Image: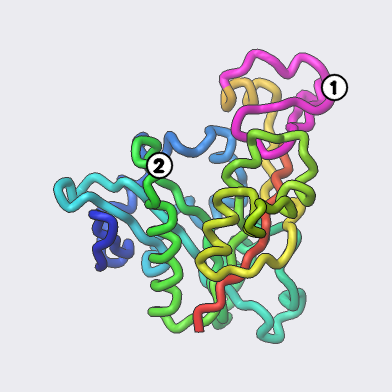
Amino acid sequence: MSEAAGLVVATFAQRPDLLGAVFGLEIQSAVPEFMRHDPVSTLYYGGGQLDHHREFGVVAVDPVQPDRPVARAFSVPFAFRDGTRGREELPDCGWDAVIRWAYEDRCAGRLATAVSALEITVAPRLQQRGISRLMLTALRDNARRLGFADLYAPLRPTDKHHEPLTRFADYVARRREDGLPYDSWVRTHVRAGARIVKVASCSMVIAGTIAEWRNWTGLGGFTESGPAIVPGALSPIHVCLEQDHAVYVEPNLWVHHRLG
């Protein structure tokens, strides 16, 4: 366990009692509802799967309220560039693919050679206070502690949802006058030493009926086929009334933190 920014950070191996609490409303409300319906996520988050990765998740608490988590971060070990077929390059399917890889590796007893961050989520009332940066440092330090030299991440650029119609590749290529990335979350990773690798064009795929999307978003729209803008989405949702279906394909950005 370590203490920084007035918070105590521990792995879930150290605080297994908080593994359920981090999915309570205080932190979970920071995640758009539709983002909780990627079916691939069950291979990591569902059915007790998290118990296999307690050493790879970290939680932050205020020492005054040690049983009330204020931030969570999850990562997963996977085999990469180890001779396994198809593992020569980071996958275009980003978040979904690395979760599948990790699940396959665990089932096959394959040795992990790297770690991928999956999420860092901070309670909305404490955002903009540097806690995400603290949790990124914790994931880096934890991966190093576990003997890994490489931490990857399929990043979800924090500010992209304000520009859902901007081409993703153009957005992530944008720079400030000082040369740093325009997006604040990508900038945080670069400042921490990360190298941008490539775009993961279909990192998450979330599909549902029109009724499900209305329930997930609280919107009464989706009344015609074609692209639809949804708050929190990085790009438009693809709606097909004829098939009573809508699909969201989210691009992410692969980055690499060398820990050695």
Q: Residue at x 76, y 53 (%)?
A: 201
Q: Residue at x 67, y 57 (%)?
A: 253
> In the image as oriented, which residue stretches furthest toward the front?
177
**Residue 72 forms part of the magenta stretch:** no
Q: Residues within 10 Å of mark 1 (few under 14, many from 20)?
A: few
Q: Residue furthest left?
A: 64
Find disc 1 in the rendering and name its residue: 242
Q: Position of residue 121 (x, y in %)?
A: 44, 48
Kindly identify the amino acid type of the residue bearing the numbered disc 1.
Glu
Q: Are marks 2 and 1 in contact (CB under 8 Å)?
A: no
Mark 1 element type: loop
Residue 78 on image: x %, y %: 57, 73
180 vs 212: above or below: below
User: For the magenta stretch, what is the residue range?
Assistant: 218-247
Frontmost residue, 245 versus 173: 173
Does 242 appear in magenta? yes
